[in-house]
Image (cartoon, helix red, strand yellow):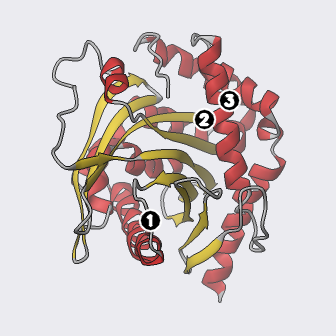
Amino acid sequence: MERKQKIKDFRKQLDTTLLTSPGLANKDAIRKLVQSQLQSAPAEVQEKRVAQVSNMLDIQRSACGNDFKSSKHGAWKLKEDTEGYRVMYREGPEGSPFHTLLTEGYADGPVDVCLGAAWELSLYKNWWPQYNFPTFKVLTSCRLKKVRLDEQISLLRMKVPWPLSDREVVLDYFELECFEDDLVIVLLNSISDTDSINEHLRGLTGNEILEAKNTVRLNFSGGFALKKIDSNTTYFRTVGNLDLKLDFVPPSLINFISRQLLASACNLYRKVVIAMVKGDGEFGNALEGPLYVRIREHMCLNNEIKNTAGPKALQNENSELGDNHVET
């Protein structure tokens, strides 16, 4: 009972931030946050990010608390609820191919480590489940392009149960730091069109995606929030709108994805975070990058210093990568 109360207390801290933070209160506040991080980006790129962040936060807020009443987004259905995480699902709008899935819980590690486990594609095979029956395996997980310090394009290719064809998704990752609230937000949006993908990767020799036979490209939009609870604990909430590219999605498939695949992924993710904290092998090496160093430094500073140093430091570091921007 005490451990179940602990996750509720942690969840309440994230809920309180999402519902009451002045820095996330409306589009104007979000615009100020985005502009401070994307100072050199064109106005249309900034506005697109503002809309994406606002939409993702709305979905995150719809999962606040424990009483899930129907809203404009639909009603959440609890699929798994443990002492360390929970998984929820809701149907998309009528006639829409999208399904919305949510996983949340806490991990025994600081924010930079939790971000690293999700940002470093080479680690995905360590925490995404690998099932022989029903078949599910991560075949490929790699970064295709580093756009900026806080943005990358990556490929995830999966083997799924027969008779379905393998699935893949090309994702644009964009990280937004809300140091005043001890919060990091990451947007995940798919790039579906092959020509568009190759345009984003133009100029990088060897980074074009090799077309895989009998592979279907998924559509995905969503992201995750990482809330610092204390120096060694982080609460995470991940939401995603997913088009599985199926004419009919049986309830059994949704149950497999939510109760087996995502539940197992939560457990493995939490274990990988612990291994990264210990600095085991490849896990420790992944955290030496400037993105994680900056987050560690700012999470340890007081709010006044964080508010003045964060955006400026980010702008300086991003300038080293040039002014590349990705339309998603």
Looking at this view, is 186 or 149 the one in front?
186
Name the N-terminal-most of marks 3 and 1. 3
- Please tell me which residue is depicted at 56% across the width and 62% down the height of the picture: 102
Q: Is residue 284 left or right of residue 12?
A: left
Residue at left 41%, top 72%? Answer: 253
Q: Position of residue 94 (x, y in %)?
A: 64, 58
Look at the picture and state if 83 lies above or below 187: below
Q: Mark 3 points at which residue?
A: 50
Q: Nearer the viewer, residue 162 or 184?
A: 162
Residue 262 seen anywhere in this rendered image of the structure: yes
Dot 3 amino acid type: Val
Tag in front: 2 or 1: 1
The answer to whether residue 8 is left or right of residue 206 is right
Q: How far apart are marks 3 and 2 (CA)?
A: 13 Å
Amino acid, disc 1: Phe
The image quarter containing residue 184 is: top right
Quarter of the image for residue 285 reads: top left
Q: Where is residue 289 in the image (x, y as percent from the top left)?
A: 36, 33
- What's the distance in space between the residues labelled 3 and 1, CA to CA? 33 Å
Q: How far apart are marks 2 and 1 (CA)?
A: 38 Å
Residue that badge 2 annotates: 177
Instruction: Look at mark 1 in the image and give the residue it sits on.
Output: 248
Amino acid found under the numbered disc labelled 2: Glu
